[in-house]
Image (cartoon, grey):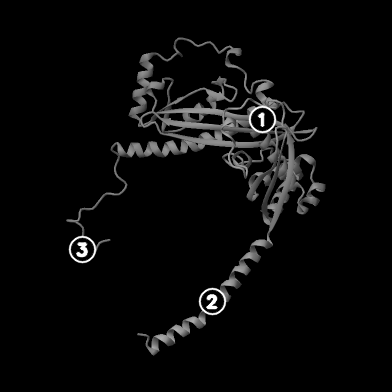
Amino acid sequence: MVTLRSAVCLLFLLSLAPVAFAAGKDDVSLDTASLDKDVTSVYGTDCEKVKPGEARSTVRVRVTDKASYLAVSSLPDLRNAKVELNEHDFNVMVYNLVDNNIEDMAIRTTKQTPEEICVEVTGYISGKNIFAAIDEALDRQKNGEEDNVTAENGGLAPSDLAETENGPLPEAEAKPEQPAKTDLAEKEPLYTPDESIPPPPVSEEQTPSAEQEKEDYLQAKAASKGLIYITPTEFFNKTTSAKYAEILREMFVKSDYFYVTDKIELADYVIGSKVLRAKVDPINKDTNRMQMVIAVESRNTDSGETETEHQNRFVLFSSSENEQKVAAKLMKQLFEKAADKIITELEIAQRRKNNDAGLPAVITPVSTSTAKKGAL
């Protein structure tokens, strides 16, 4: 039964609804205006021919990179910067914006035939990021600084991860592809094979004996250190090298929580490293662009659990530079970056393991029988 009082309350609430609705509409429109005011939409399209024997996934990465570059480099806000900056610094700035500042990036395949792939790239960039990039590039050019690394996203670039609107690539393309003609593997290896450099003579005293290995193992355990074994670096062309694994060894040796062993059967953790991609594309007759993707992985020998850290970078460099030296320098930077994150995680795990082994607890529980009444 509806009383007079309840009816009045109902009418009062209904009278407030249009006001609330109008206020809601005003709020939404204000938010939208504030969002649209400081962003610039980007749009770019490009096509690439498929080379004989080249996987379509490789072509798609290349055409996406070029379409993204065209989308950003043609922005009206960059016209003055293009005049003030030299070509190299302008390219570095554009790729920096592409790799780090395009938001809501969408990649759509507009044409795909056995001979050609076309894509269009859309998204938007915050105005403050554009002007910050311009200021940074102008300052770098003024001070004569060189900073070729333009993508520092810690993982794979958007163009590597993107799926087309037609969905993932067919299973037939998921298998490992042959290196493209511009892959560094087809020119000369990224490293000098270890066997071509005679190792320094090793005396018997320098060669760890079984007794010394056992002593090192006992010392490591007594110091509550984890034992680390580092495998040779694997490359995308199925070769391996212990040369670059030394970068990881040096970093673990500096840690207070680990001891590096040469016996994999003694190890608490096995550390592996891979170069998944090392590719050079010409931007123009004077500038090349190198992409490198690496991974560093740790495996717990007891639990079998693994943790992997990927690093991906793009580098612009002069076509007159030795690309092998550029690649070696970049590889060292990426290995150190990835290993630093892996070591941090393993040190946390090792400290936790040491605490569980008998170190005093951080918080000592208080018995309810001895706790004072009213204590927190």
Q: Nearer the viewer, mark 2 or mark 3?
A: 2
Q: Which residue is mark 1?
A: 279
Q: Nearer the viewer, mark 1 or mark 3?
A: 1
Query: Which residue type does callout 1 highlight?
Result: Lys
Q: Which residue is mark 3?
A: 373
Query: Which residue type does callout 2 highlight?
Result: Ala
Which of 259 and 19 lies nearest the eye of the viewer? 19
Mark 1 Cα-neighbour bin, 10 Å: few <14, some 14–19, many ≥20: some
Q: Is residue 13 left or right of residue 185?
A: left
Query: Which residue type does callout 3 highlight?
Result: Lys
Q: Of label 2 and label 1, which has the lower sequence position? A: 2
Q: Residue at 75% x, 47% y: name it.
A: 73
| Quarter of the image with the C terminus in it | bottom left
Residue 358 x/y as whole percent: 28, 38
Residue 74 in view:
yes
Q: Of label 1 and label 3, which has the lower sequence position? A: 1
Q: Residue furthest left?
A: 369
Q: Which residue is mark 2?
A: 20
Q: How far is mark 2 from mark 3, CA to CA?
A: 51 Å
